[in-house]
Image (cartoon, rainbow, N blue to C red):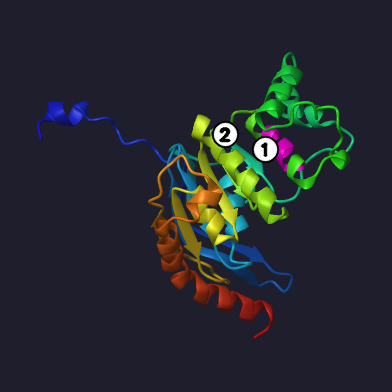
Amino acid sequence: MTDEASAARPAPQAAAVALAQCTIAFRLADGGAYTAVEGASLKVADGEFVSIVGPTGCGKSTLLNVAAGLLAPSAGGVTIFGAPLDGLNLAAGYLFQADALFPWKTAVENVAIGLEIAGADGDARERAEGWLRRVGLAGFGARYPHMLSGGQRKRVGLAQVLIRDPKILLMDEPFGPLDAQTRQIMGNLLLDLWSADRKAVLFVTHDLEEAIALSDRVVIMSAGPAARIIGDWPVPLKRPRDIGEVKLEPAFHALHRDIWHTLKEEVVRGYAQTEGG
């Protein structure tokens, strides 16, 4: 290849999130240390939807917190769009499993608060009302969180994160507390919003079916302690997707069987550890 041809090639784009050989350990009261995650490496490209699945207590949420800058790895490093992460990941929005709504604020006030804190309060309310419409809650802006169903509160939380237009979405089992039907509705809503503006997504879930239905890739972690990433599967299912319909496809079932073959042993091992077996 000539120098001219080499120079004409676009430079490879840096991953939105890159974890390089990250180990996360916590100090114990007796002076010892507990290694939650060991040597984890993971990249999420810009516009890619990646889910992490693993047994309870394997460190999925811990990795998410490292990507958010809420935890610093004991070893290894994190880069965000090629830049080392030092402190909070300001490019990311974080949607937690538990509701993060202020009970004394209305739905529209909860959505607008992110912009107001950032100093963009001039049109914050108008933009918040627009996001409530996008998540199917037009007319609910004046309601307080206790007046909303679990699914409606999740919609408010999603709008609260997306209104700031983060480049990266970090999602920690956001639909876990919901019933099966509402989870499916929320999953389709998430895919619709994501398809309109493809952000990098790192999504943590216990539900393998949910992970396959949503994602471009599914990453599997071993049981802890010293949990590792032990598998990374691309999802060869066409988009756009409907979560209910995609689960009927033969390719979905074939991929589920393939991943479960690896995951099952880790789930059993993790359960035995929690039961003291």
Residue that label 2 marks: 193
Using the rendered image of the protein, determine whether residue 213 is visible from the camera's viewpoint: yes
**Label 1, on which residue?**
158
Residue located farthest toward the left when viewing the structure as drawn: 2
Kindly report the distance in space between the C-alpha atoms of the residues bearing marks 2 and 1: 10 Å
Q: Quadrant of the C terminus?
A: bottom right
**In this picture, residue 20 sits left or right of residue 31:** left
Relative image position of residue 88 (x, y in whole percent): 62, 40
Measured as percent of width and height from the top left, residue 223 is found at 55, 71
* Residue 175 makes an appearance in the image: no
Compared across the picture, whether 212 is left or right of 152 comes to left
Q: Name the residue nearer the viewer: 116 or 171.
A: 171
- The one nearer the camera, 122 or 127, is 127
User: Marks 2 and 1: CB-CB under 8 Å?
Assistant: yes
Question: Bounds of the magenta span?
Answer: 153-160
**Can you tell which quarter of the image residue 148 is in?**
top right
Check if residue 173 falls in the magenta segment: no
Q: Residue 141, position in %: x, y?
A: 80, 27
Task: Between residue 26 and residue 272, name the one nearer to us.
Answer: 272
Please give left or right for residue 70 compared with residue 81 in the image.
Answer: right
Farthest-out residue, bottom: 277
